[in-house]
Amino acid sequence: MDRYVRESKETNNKIHMDKMLIGVCNLSIIPLRAEPSHRSELVSQILFAERFEILKTESDWTYVRLLSPDYEGWVQSGQFVIDRGASIKNEEGFVVDLLGAVAKREGVSIDLVPGTRLSGRSVVLIEGDEAYTVSSPLRKPGLSDFATELPKLMTYYKDRPYLWGGRSAAGIDCSGLSQAMYRHFGVDLPRDAYQQVLQGENVDFIAEIKPGDLAFFDNAEGRIIHVGMMVDQQTIFHASVSVRLDRMDAQGIFNAEQNKYTHNFRIVKRYF
């Protein structure tokens, strides 16, 4: 790229970031909806300390774009605070482990769900404001302990209820599950299955599947509609009605309780 063009783009990006109005979630977890209404579809959830660009407001609702990963929707005004001095401040290096944690400051106590990403045990949401102190040790994400941590993750999430748009053990969807499990190891995935499938490397044969690979499934129109994590070459961990283990082969996911295939296999991807 031409140096002048590159520097011009960098300058424009900096100007854009400087003009951003940044919101930050100051509650444990809040809904992100498709439309500005409590009756609207839940498309995702925002966790404590996650930041987002405020794009517009409408009555009691605010349309936002998450900074990481990039995702848009409506949140109820009042379920976040504005950090006018934040610009881009997304340098979180830890996540809340499976035991959970509590963030406390004077008069305030907030339960944090596993996978909440933080900068450390002292968390400042608004520049110049009093810090929250996190009660429990935090996990430094990494892949060195993948073999020992994966069974713990599966035990934690297994049998949790399915919730479209959910990102916690109180209710989680298929892509929210893969995203949460990968975040535990420091790997960021997009929010939805059809976005996640665009990343990673193809695994061409089922015999080459390794634990942690993601398998994707499509509908009759060829649209990716489901994702799950492979435990071995024949077993998948996924959220469908509840978080569960099922058998998978070249045809798809076989649900032994229903005695039928429930999802049509499309592709397996590897991310680490």
Image (cartoon, grey):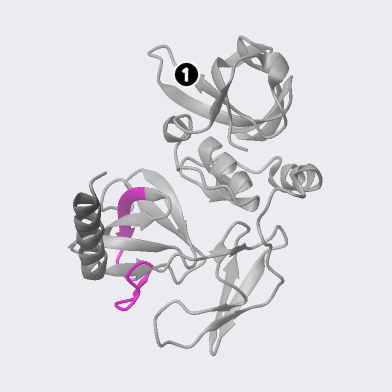
Please indicate, yes or no, whether residue 50 appears anywhere in the rendered image.
yes
Give the residue displayed 63% in from the left and 45% down from the top.
Answer: 181
- Left or right? Give the position of 4 relative to 265: left
Give the residue displayed 48% in from the left and 29% down from the top.
Answer: 197
Percent position (x, y) of residue 40?
A: 32, 46
Give the residue displayed 43% in from the left and 48% down from the top.
Answer: 44
Q: Residue furthest front?
A: 3
- Left or right? Give the position of 181 relative to 179: right
Q: Which residue is mark 1?
A: 218
Front residue (pair 148, 202): 202
Secondary element under disc 1, as helix, strand or loop, is strand
Percent position (x, y) of residue 213?
A: 64, 30
Q: Amino acid at mark 1?
A: Asp
Q: Picture quarter containing residue 230?
A: top right
Percent position (x, y) of residue 261?
A: 61, 13
Residue stretch in magenta: 71-88
